[in-house]
Amino acid sequence: MANKKIPFRRCVGCGEMKEKTELIRVIKTPEDEIIIDSTGKKNGRGAYICNTKECFSKARASKGLEKSLKTAIPAETYDSLEKEITDNATK
Ligand SMILES: [Zn+2]
């Protein structure tokens, strides 16, 4: 019986550890763009967040994403990220 190991990552919004597959990966590309990595395979410094507006708002307020990615994130980048968070993937 194979014991499948699923990696856990910490959400920068609520701070809870969750299975990586439940979280959205946000990365900073080598071009310093902040994007959602829906494939989970792109290179770059990554941060993880639950697929909920609530965690997104918390991360925005606490600057959790900025701390994890070690970069400043402009308001318009937050706005475009927010549009990609749909709230329904984990329900
Ligand atoms: Zn969360």
Image: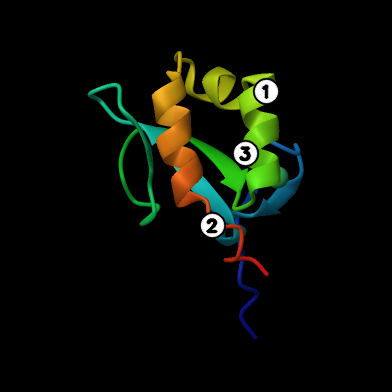
Residue for point 47% across, 30% down: 78
Residue for point 58% across, 18% down: 67
Would you say 54 lies left or right of 6 here? right
- The amino acid marked with disc number 1 is Ala
- Residue 81 coordinates in the image, percent (x, y): 45, 39
* Mark number, residue 56: 3
Q: CA distance from mark 2 to mark 3?
A: 11 Å
- Residue 9 coordinates in the image, percent (x, y): 63, 45
- The amino acid marked with disc number 3 is Phe
Q: Which residue is mark 1?
A: 61
* Mark number, residue 49: none
Between 55 and 82, the one lying in front of the other is 82
Q: Which residue is mark 2?
A: 86
- Residue 3 coordinates in the image, percent (x, y): 65, 75
Q: CA distance from mark 2 to mark 1?
A: 19 Å
Marks 2 and 3 in Cβ contact (< 8 Å):
no
Q: How many marks?
A: 3
- The amino acid marked with disc number 2 is Thr
Closer to the chain start, of discs 3 and 1, is 3
Q: Secondary structure at mark 1?
A: helix
The answer to whether residue 12 is visible is no
Residue for point 39% across, 54% down: 38
Location of residue 26 (image quadrant) = top left
The answer to whether residue 49 is visible is yes
